[in-house]
Every structure is written in C-alpha cells, then in structure tokens.
Amino acid sequence: MKAIRIHRFGPPDVLQLEDVPDPRPAPGRILIRVRAAGMNYADLLIREGRYPKLAALPYTPGYEAAGVVEALGEGVEGPAVGTRVVAAVSAPGTFAEYVEAEPAQVTEIPEGVGDEEALALPVQALTAWLALRIGGRVAPGDSVLIPAAAGGAGHLAVQLAKRLGAARVLAGASTKEKRDLALRLGADAAIDYTEGGWADQVRAATDGRGADVVFERSGGAHADESLRALAKGGRLIVFGADSLTEPRLSTEQLRGLLVQGQAYAGFSLMALPDGVRRAALHELFAFVAAGALQVHVGARFPLARAADAHRAMASRATSGKVVINL
C-alpha cells in the first residue's frame, strides 16, 4: 500500500510517500481502508521531534481516518465489513491506504454525515463540546471568548457555545478572512488577536466585564492575554499549548484569580470516562446530520502532498479542518 513515512524528525520534507506491506488485522483489531485522513497541529509538533515518545521512528503520521471496514481481526464481531467508519487512533498511522484500529476507537458514520465532516468530530469537535460544557460550564447568558476561532476546534466551538446558550461569542483570529468565517458561523464579534492588548477589545465588546469563559489553545504569553480578558468569576480552559511555552502564572496573576473568583484549568479528552466521550460523540454526529453543526474544510491535499499540508498548517494559512484525501 501507499503510505507517508517519516524516518527522521525535521521539516516537512521528511514526509515521504513510500510503498509498504499491506497490513492484516491483528487479533482484536479492525482494518480500515482509508478514504480521508485528518490533520491536527499536534502532527506538526510530533514531526518536528518535540514529542519523541509519541512516535518511534520510522512512523506513518496521522491520528484520524475516515473510510470503510476492510477486515476484522480474530475476536472482533463488528462493525461489518464495508461499514463506513471514522477512527481516532492512539498511535499514528492514518496517512496511508489502510490503518488498524481498536474497536473502541472506531465509530460508525451515520447517514447524512460525510467522511470529511466525520474526521472533525472525534478529536476537535469533541474537545470543543466537552471543554465548553464540562470544563467551562457554559450556561445561558454567558459570554464566551474563542481566541483561535477559525481553527479546527475553534470554528466548531463558536457554534457549540451558541448551542449551550452563550449570549455573546467573541471570536479571535489573525486575518479578516478568518474573522469573517467566524462571524458567518455565528460569532457576535470578531477580534484581531495580533494587535497588542487585544484583551481590551474583549472588554469593550462585553461592556467592560470581560468573557465568562475563555477557550484557550495557545498557552504561554497568549494565555496571559486571555487571562486579562476574563471576567470576575470566569473560567479559562486551556486545552492546548501550541506555543510550546507552559502557561506562566505570576504571583500577581494568582492573587488576581483568588480575589476575582476565577478558575484557570486544563482540559484533556483522555481524562474523561470513555462512556462520556462516546455519548458526546454521538450527539455531535446527530448535530451534523441535522444540519445544526457545520464542519468547515479549509484545505484538502492528496496523500502525495502531505508535506504541503504540513507547510500550509505551519504557516497558519489554513482554517477549519485540514484533510488528506486518498
């Protein structure tokens, strides 16, 4: 089969299209014929060697796949061969014509949901839905700030915050095109977070109060500004650290959290029970099938151009879901 292989950590050029042996499903596993694979920013960091424990060289990148069941390993009863499924695997390998997955990682794609839409649900949409609902406790009337509102998780969080009853959704993005996308998806105001002191824009858009909930991805200095935009009694949920700088809380900031009754917390899907994640994922499939949640596919690349996909995402030129089509 054709697969992207990485033999050394480094720039996008390390992604090479190669012929590798066709896999057979191991006992207890499902073999999927991949139609489309999804990308996340974490894929770039792993390829650069920032998290060597997550991928042993050589490896095939990618953690999300949509396709059809090709074969079932011994002891696996379903889903049936030919069933459309999406999988979020625990070890990389989806940038290939076939990938193996554990049954718990595989979900049948219902009617009314396309392959590319399905790719956005098991990680990015699920993170947005549960981080806002469980971590941020978004309630009717809240104002919600989403600093990276045109990204893979952010553009879905804009819509899901509204579904939870947010009175105002404030979308942060670096370009007019990205801000316009967030507004089309339901944001009430758009903020340019490349401008210094952009937390002042948040306070201006909330009559000086600030955001009740902040859905923060970047970490580091960016999270500092998000904290400055937080309302009294607000909740700042950090679900990523793209800057690779740990969120820094000074003594003054800690004192501010205490005095203003604010919460500053991390969020991880894997910290939640499997039953909670699966129930929420089925909710998201129902939203998409009913037209209540729109997945924006911002870029598509063939498998042979996987390196170009990495370059585009690294340059922040993409929006929404980035898809590798096979």
Image (cartoon, rainbow, N blue to C red):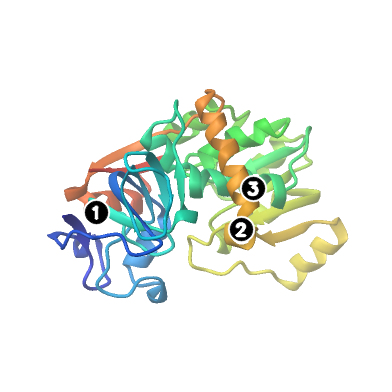
Quadrant holding the C terminus: top left
Quadrant holding the N terminus: bottom left
Residue 273, percent across and down? 65, 58
Q: What is the spatial separation of the Cα atoms under label 2 and label 3, in whole angstroms? A: 20 Å
Numbered disc 2: secondary structure? helix
Numbered disc 1: secondary structure? loop
Residue 157, percent across and down? 58, 40
User: What residue is disc 2 on?
Assistant: 223
Res. 202 in view: yes
Res. 146 in view: no
Q: Specify whether 68 is left or right of 126.
A: left
Packing grade of label 1 (10 A; few <14, some 14-19, many >=20) is many
Q: Specify whether 174 is left or right of 37.
A: right
Q: Specify whether 189 is left or right of 18.
A: right
Residue 231, percent across and down? 78, 47
Task: State which tag comes first along the sequence, 1 or 2.
Answer: 1
Residue type at mark 2 is Ala
Residue 54, percent across and down? 41, 71
Numbered badge on residue 96? 1
- The residue drawn where x is 59% and y is 32% is 159
User: What residue is disc 3 on?
Assistant: 130
- The residue drawn where x is 38% and y is 48% is 316
Out of 246 and 117, give the one closest to the viewer: 117
Task: State which tag comes first along the sequence, 3 or 1.
Answer: 1
Tally the numbered discs: 3
